[in-house]
Amino acid sequence: MFDLLDGNKERSFTPEKLLTISAAGMLLGFGLCGAGLATVRIEIATPFLVAASVAFWGSALGLVVGALWVVLQMLTGRGRG
Amino acid sequence: MLVVFHPELHPIFEVIGYSVGFAVYRRGRKQHGDFLADERRWMVTAAAAVGALVGSRVLGLLEQMPQTGWQWINLLKPGGKTIVGGLLGGWIAVELVKWFAGTTKRTGDLFALPLCVGIAIGRIGCFLAGMADDTYGRATTLVWGVDFGDGVRRHPTQIYEVGFLVGLGWLLWSYHARPHRNGRVFRLFMAAYLGWRLAIDFLKPQPLIGGMNAIQWACLAGLIALGFGELSRKQEALRV
């Protein structure tokens, strides 16, 4: 258990930052809003696919690393005030 | 009016939306202060971002389910995300983290204006993506109807939303500057945006379930949750 209101260890890069950036990157990688049919309209979506794939898989990796980092911190009791 | 519609413009405006939204958030945090320490604020932000990712995807695919059916593999395919799912997913994730952390303090006020600004910019990208983005409106004979490329003049619902968000942003900015109960700005934003989407989505040609699309049902659920939250806060205040 940790307290949200206490503790403020200054670090330049944290798992929370990595998770935030990765989640935004994955959202970006998915492409269009509401266009579930982009999977069908693949000819329209094609120019997206290379850039979107890089953003998607890079961010997915970031999410996994970030989540493991958080778990590791909780297990070792570090960074939780 | 000559408008060039191209799907590639969508991610460009999305990136600008994220960046400007983050800049507005940083400015607001500096201006209004924050009772959360940096690291804890990042924890809330990360929960909101991951929750938004999950919520946006799940609701986006549910919205299209009447046409495409549900397949788990679709979660990894391009397309199919929605702002309402992102907001509700982020909200739920932050509440879970706060519950886990044992805090009842409201943490959302600083996100309200940045979300308004970010969504408004992102919606310009939705508009410029044309028919590829499923956010256009139904056919209309009104003079401001826009042909997104299929030869049909349609309600530019994305532009309506930009106008709504500009007004809402101004309202939230004025409200935040005055003394207010903690958490009020965020709840005001959520109620206004969910109410707006509940109404404006009637102008969109999306697949319906029981008279409304999945996003509208989610808006209704969110509004009911906000209403219950408000009621329980009032009852608590009466007891004290």
Image (cartoon, rainbow, N blue to C red):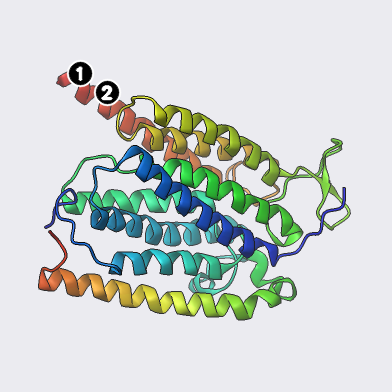
Mark number, residue B238: 1
Residue B29, quarter of picture: top left
Query: What residue is rendered at 50% in x and 75% in y?
Result: A56
Looking at the image, is B238 positioned above or below residue A55?
above
Q: Which mark is residue B196?
A: none
Dot 1: within a 10 Å radius of its alpha carbon, few (fewer than 14), some, or many (20 or more) residues? Answer: few
| Chain assignment, label 1 | B
Picture disc at residue B234: 2
Check disc 1 and give the amino acid type: Leu
> Residue B154, relative to residue B223: is it above or below?
below
Residue B25's place in the image compared with B196, above or below, is: below
Tell me which corner region of the image, top left, top right, bottom left or bottom right, holds residue B108: top left
**Are discs 1 and 2 located on one and the same chain?**
yes
Q: Position of residue A32 (x, y in %)?
A: 62, 63
Helix, strand or loop under label 2: helix
**Residue at x-position 63% and y-position 38%:** B200
